[in-house]
Image (cartoon, coloured by chain):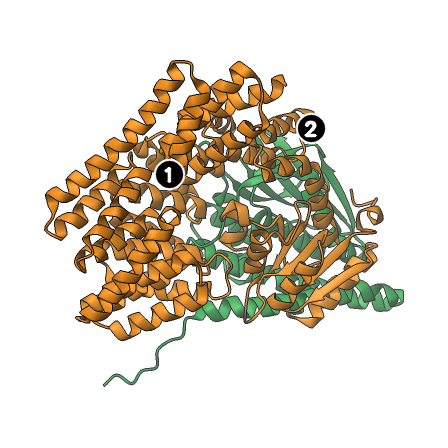
Amino acid sequence: MISNTNSMFVGKHFLIIDDFQGMRGMLREMLKSFGAKDIDMASNGKEAIASLEQTKYSAVLCDYNLGIGKNGQQILEEAKYRDLIGLSTAWIIITAEKTSDMVVGAAEYMPDDYIIKPVTEATLRGRVEKVMAKKTALHGIEKAISVKDFARAVALCDETLGASKANATDLLRIKTGLLLNMGSYDQAKQVFERILAERDVPWAKTGLAKVAFYMGDAVTARRLLQEVLRENPAYLEAHDWLAKVHEQQGDLDEAQRVLARSTALSPNSYVRQRSLGEIAHKRGDLEAAETAYRKSIKLGEHSILKTPVAHLGLAKLCSASDNPIEALQILKSVGKEFNDQETNFHAKVVEGMVHRKSGDYVAASKAAKEIAEIVQREKNSLPAEVMVEATQLLLETGNKEAAESLVQTIVKNNHENKNLMARVNEVYSQAGMVEEGQNLVENARQEVIEANNRGVTLAKEGKLGEAIEWLRNAKSMLPNNKRILINLANVSVLSMQKNGKNDTLVQEVRECMEKVAKLGADEKWCTQIQNALDAIQKSN
Amino acid sequence: MDNQETTPDISAFLASAIHDMKNSISVLIHFLEDNLSTLDAPAQKQAAPMLYEVKRVNINLIQMLSIYKVGNNFYPFDLTENSIDEFVTEIAAQNQALMDYMGIDLALDYDPDMVWYFDRELVAGVVSHALNNAAHYTNGKLKLSLNEVAGELVIRVEDNGRGYPASVIEAGDAVSKGVSFASGSTGLGLYFSAMVAKLHKNRGKTGSMTLENGGEYGGGCFVLRLP
């Protein structure tokens, strides 16, 4: 591999990101000696992003610790998030020490490789070549993934695995990740078990835990994750999942404990610090929540992955501890920092709550009015959790009608989500309207069930065209209802099985399944529909 | 009132100082490897030990930081499949300049198709340390071999020097059994190697490290076994 070097470097475009001039010069000299000619350099995150916006690089060598501003990991995250790098761009982080985020962090934002300093010519050349060769070998698979054709990506993984032993671990990890994404848990489980029969591999055992979690066996998931952590106490991904399992099981104490440990392991992770804040907040550990939210906000300053969750949580905490001035300041700044529809809406809801808590009822009513107006226009694009909070404010400020309309939207789009409906009932009960709340929820639920049943009945009678029309109509009114999306996809597949492939329907089914996956996968149906869709596409 | 100054969090300084030092070491090693070849033979022989010393500083830094992190359960232990060919090629290339200047012949013996699960940086740290150490005591010949024996990857670094003194072999045994912490830089290296061995586990088996005399070249043998 080392011998035929020039051909791999000639004609390729490289970017070096390092704040230390001596290192930049040295890396450049090395790349040149391998035959590279086009080499750009950046000394900080800002310059790096500017270069990445201009040019699609073949390979990026990026120092981890860049002083102030973004670190190397955050540049990578932004480059991936904003599609500034292509599928075949090799990203290598250069670092004084390996961190958990680089090796056992979130897979979608991991670098292709990392080099621990000191960087020597031999290491650099070997690693860059290896990663570029791997990127070439996996290009077809990554391309299939990028257009969400997961079934084809899995087939390509199998093909590549069968052809050679090279990149076997990468391929198995990609393949099992895809199977989990598609809801093909049994298949994923088989692969993990085959690997574990040979040896104890932490990622495979973590994978097995994920399967157990998705299949509703939280006890097994927890046991497996604890086993992984006993042998690998710094394994971040297992911490992330264990916290998730505890939270889902309602064991918030344990969830917080695990997250406290994972934030210690990964002190620069904005996302984990935010989760810690949320869990502590839920538990009522306001002190820990405040600390975590504040850290998270600071860490997120340069991160493309930041969300307003920590800001809004902190504003609520300030309000609860009778500090409305800071709460309102935070809400003002969050609007400026994020300035999207969802954030502005959520911030407005929290603002109303802050005013109510501080006794400024005029301001609270004003906020509630604005919310009622926004809800009229945008209710189908707002997240359910935020809408429940809005419902509470609307009820507290006497906007009963607006609250009712909001509850209908919430329930109709989530008629099978028992937790959410319980929360709506709780909000009504706090406002002293237990019965009204229950009736509202139940009626809205029945309405969806009937609409859905009508579609299913039409399909059973063989009136597939009518069924599709009916469900499409239901979908346009309730765009976030999982059951309706699944049924529409299913009836569309049935129709194609009978009448042949139809590109519009294929596209529609894909969109439905993507939406379902986003809302939380539904294993059995997802797999069945996916398989049927694949069969239809192959037969034509 | 308590006027005592609070102790700063030393680990934060440690990490940033190491980040800094690693940059300096990178530049130093690069300079030495590049420029030693421009010297005439006697000057080269005189300057070669500098490369050995810089590498020693680097290895010690890595060992201290790793021991600190493993001890606090912060080390991101990364048990992944590694191509033995890539692993050996990289280590050999990293040490080539030193071997050349010191006039040492490094032989490699491994199956290029083999793959094995281990933490790349930790095991590379152990092997580099063993090679650097052996380079100092050998009589011109070194051998790095990697073979699968009874379900374990056996990594051997052998030299044709006078072998380990009995006290070092005893220290190696004691550190492996966890009954002693030998002092000085020998102690650090042995402790690190034994720690890395013990971190590698598979299906109830644990890795091990031993020091022996003899082997193919009749000198010291450093042996790391990974299940």
Query: Considering only order in the chain, which callout, 1 or 2, is on the residue closer to the N terminus?
Result: 2
Toward which corner of the image does residue A168 lie, by quadrant?
top right
Residue at (52% x, 60% y) in the render: B65
| Amino acid at pointer 1 | Met
Q: Is residue A326 left or right of B136 when viewed as pictured?
A: left
If the image is split into quadrants, where does the C terminus of chain A sit?
top right
- The image quadrant that residue A79 belongs to is bottom right
Label 1 is found on which chain of the structure? A
Looking at the rendered structure, the kind of residue marked 2 is Ser
Name the chain letter of the residue that bears numbered label 2: A
Residue B88 drawn at (x, y percent)? 70, 43
Which quadrant: the N terminus of chain A?
Answer: top right
Percent of width and height locating residue B9: 41, 71
Chain B colour as displayed: green
Q: Is residue A446 left or right of residue B208?
A: left
**Residue found at x 28% / y 35%:** A415
Tell me the crowding category of disc 2: few under 14, some 14 to 19, or many 20 or more residues within 10 angstroms, Cα based: few
The correct choice, above or below, for A431 with respect to A365 in the image is above
Which residue is the site of mark 1? A477
> Tag 2, which secondary structure?
loop
Q: Mark 2 highlights which residue? A: A164
